[in-house]
């Protein structure tokens, strides 16, 4: 083949390769920052009802965590489940709480952004939360489904200002309505922890998600958090004091935790958190394994599986991951029950 032809073919191949090469990281970062700036401008405009935040692109240089939380919130909203909606509004609130710090160099002194924190706190921990797929999302008595649905649609269409604007409007209407209501503005921390703990525990012991009414559990757990999560806190304090020892006091704490479920059976049925008799039997059989310290206490004192799970639970507790703590305690109950009723390969 003619050498000149080979040179031409090589040049064409090289130019084609360069044309399809991925854009440089600097360009991708610039695009992401513009999207974030438009989203933040939208949030501020939705809350403050102004649109003159013209210098944000010059002063916002960081905000990847905000972008990650809003992106994950979008996925949660798209799940169209109570759990997804609750997690989504929580992530939105966490992102909004970072905005005052994000724009601190933007010279927005004429605007009081301190209320964004208060708004986000209420949105993150709603006292009452009701969801009906495709129809309603009611936060503290305020219908916000259309705001969230519009925000999801806007993000899909790459309309980032509108995405942020609808989020800002949702926070604003909930906040304004809260000032007219007598209900507490947000859920108590212990109540939320109790909800997450029970949800995690039920998941591990095998209750189907369709059999647990998460909405009812969340909305009726009011003022019961200390009774439910208090014994868990007691167990964790003992574990922290004796990190390498699983002794009788530890088992007494597990015994207290068993009464969370046994004493709470009537509550779960009355409030329609669970509806099936089989589910009640499942809860009971796993809680009963903690009723008494094992006859051969040494077996569990030295059992590395339980010791390991308890240490993981302590780490999750200190990190504020109540749902993970519930799953850890559920895993221990499942392991002991399986040991007592026949070997379980899944528990190895």
Image (cartoon, rainbow, N blue to C red):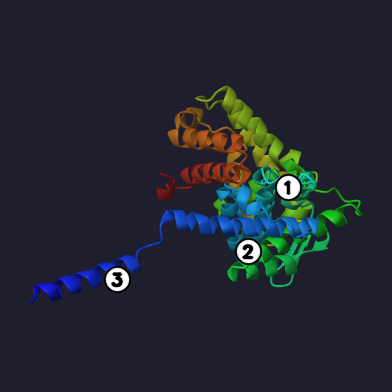
Label whose residue precedes the other's in the sequence (1 or 3):
3
Q: Looking at the image, which residue sits at the far front?
A: 4
Nearer to us of marks 2 and 1 is 2
Q: Nearer the viewer, mark 1 or mark 3?
A: 3
Q: Which residue is mark 3?
A: 16
Which of 283/42 is in front?
42
Q: Is residue 109 above or below residue 10?
A: above
Mark 3, residues whose alpha carbon is within 10 Å: few (<14), some, or many (≥20)? few
Q: Quadrant of residue 288?
A: top right
Q: Are marks 2 and 3 in contact (CB under 8 Å)?
A: no
Give the side of residue 112 with respect to residue 238, left or right. right
Q: SS at mark 2?
A: helix
Q: Position of residue 136 (x, y in %)?
A: 75, 68
Residue 212, numbered circle: none
Look at the picture and state if 126 lies above or below 146.
Answer: above
In the foreground, 209 or 93? 93
């Amino acid at each position: 083949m003619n050498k000149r032809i080979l040179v031409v073919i090589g040049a064409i191949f090289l130019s084609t390769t360069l044309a399809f090469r991925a854009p440089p990281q600097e360009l991708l970062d610039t695009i992401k920052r513009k999207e974030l700036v438009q989203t933040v401008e939208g949030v501020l405009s939705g809350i403050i009802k102004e649109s003159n935040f013209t210098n944000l692109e010059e002063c916002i240089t960081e905000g990847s965590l905000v972008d990650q939380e809003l992106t994950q919130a979008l996925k949660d909203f798209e799940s169209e489940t109570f759990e997804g909606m609750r997690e989504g509004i929580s992530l939105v609130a966490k992102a909004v709480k970072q905005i005052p710090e994000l724009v601190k160099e933007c010279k927005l002194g004429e605007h009081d952004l301190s209320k964004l924190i208060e708004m986000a706190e209420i949105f993150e921990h709603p006292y009452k939360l009701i969801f009906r797929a495709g129809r309603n999302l009611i936060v503290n008595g305020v219908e916000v489904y259309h705001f969230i649905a519009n925000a999801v649609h806007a993000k899909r269409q790459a309309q980032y200002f509108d995405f942020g604007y609808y989020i800002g409007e949702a926070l604003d209407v909930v906040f304004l309505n809260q000032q007219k209501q007598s209900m507490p503005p947000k859920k108590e921390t212990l109540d939320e922890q109790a909800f997450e703990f029970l949800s995690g525990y039920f998941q591990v012991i095998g209750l189907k998600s369709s059999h647990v009414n998460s909405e009812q559990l969340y909305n009726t757990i009011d003022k019961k958090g200390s009774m439910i999560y208090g014994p868990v806190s007691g167990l964790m304090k003992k574990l922290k004091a004796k990190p390498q020892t699983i002794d009788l006091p530890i088992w007494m704490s597990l015994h207290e935790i068993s009464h969370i479920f046994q004493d709470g059976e009537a509550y779960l049925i009355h409030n329609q958190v669970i509806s099936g008799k089989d589910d009640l039997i499942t809860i009971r059989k796993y809680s009963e394994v903690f009723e008494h310290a094992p006859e051969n206490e040494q077996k569990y004192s030295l059992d590395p599986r339980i010791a390991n799970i308890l240490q993981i639970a302590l780490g999750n507790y200190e990190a504020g991951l109540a749902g993970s703590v519930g799953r850890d305690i559920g895993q221990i109950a499942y392991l002991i029950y399986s040991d007592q009723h026949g070997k379980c390969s899944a528990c190895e």
